[in-house]
Image (cartoon, grey):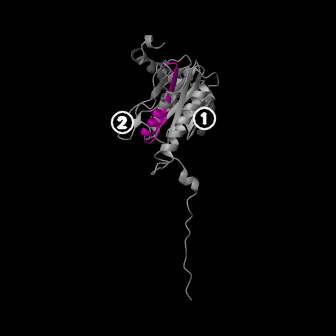
Amino acid sequence: MNSPSLTVRRPYPHPARLERKKPPMTAAVGFVYDDGLVFCADTKVDYPVKANESKLPFLTFDNGRCALQFAIAGNDINFPKSAITRCAEMLEKTDFSTATIDSIKNTVEFSLAEFYRDHIFTHPDRMPTQLYIQMLVGIWWRNETRLYALHETVLLRVEKYECIGAGEYLSKYLIKQYERANTGPFTLTDAAFLADYCVREAIDYDDKCGGEADIVVMRNSGEIDNGYRTALYPNYDLPRKFQDETWRLLRNLGEAQMQGRANRKAPEIVSGFCERIQAVEAESRKWESRDFPESTLE
């Protein structure tokens, strides 16, 4: 009698796993603060060649009375750039004498959805990890700004902040830490600090991010530039140095606890920590006047 053959059944991959989208290159964030919007993105580009370029395209319409600010992410940024071109062509036909910020948003959404249907969904070699677009859109119209995030064919209103790209997970983690410690009104100081810090940390930590942190401020008045009082006062190394000292403090307190000397050693350990924090801040200010002259800090 022949023994039955052993058949090993290999389960098919779950559809959700097949469709799971890996985040495209870039670390980009957008914030709503009390007088406008702040955008920041890295500048690393791998396609068609490795280079650095801005991922914050900017458009104006109606003789400068309407403006759009984008932050884009994608493994091939030609796709989001082409989508923005399509958007600009459609907005050029808008009758701004009767336009509202909602109608401008609807036009942007329609043009981006058209592009998605024409060039993303129908692409013969479409792979979620290659042709997936992420985008933040800021609209300024009549002393009002709004922030939206593109989700395939729809624009979703963003009330506080949104992060896109490979650095999304890290940026949201850092923002939640900051929010836990700062619960007051969200100002330009908060937005500029967080935008710059999140993107710089992503550049340091994630190999899909790189280049420099490119930042733009879009104010409700219509002023759009990258001028702001230094975001990471007084230099970009200060938060990390403070973190290093905090970890040393926790390690020293833990060591004292393990040795049964916490009650006696804790005041001395904390006092030493405060002295080192003051020394780090004083050392950081030595070059502030050189890199940020007083006349530029307004």
What residue did someone put label 1 on?
156
Residue range of the region highlighted in magenta in the rendering: 64-86
Between the residue at mark 1 and the residue at mark 2, the CA separation in whole angstroms equals: 31 Å
**Residue 208 is covered by the magenta coloring:** no
Extreme-bottom residue of the structure: 1
Residue at image position (63%, 31%) is: 263
Q: Which residue is mark 2?
A: 51
Task: Give, as a three-letter code, the residue at label 2.
Answer: Ala
Label 1 vs 2, first from the N-terminus: 2
Between 180 and 56, which is closer to the camera in this rendering?
A: 56
On the image, which quarter does residue 152 sit in?
Answer: top right
Dot 1 amino acid type: Leu
Label 2 element class: strand
Residue closer to the observer: 245 or 262: 245
Front residue (pair 255, 64): 64
Badge 1 marks a residue whose secondary structure is strand
| Label 1 crowd bin: few (<14), some (14–19), many (20+), radius 10 Å | some
Viewport quadrant of the N terminus: bottom right
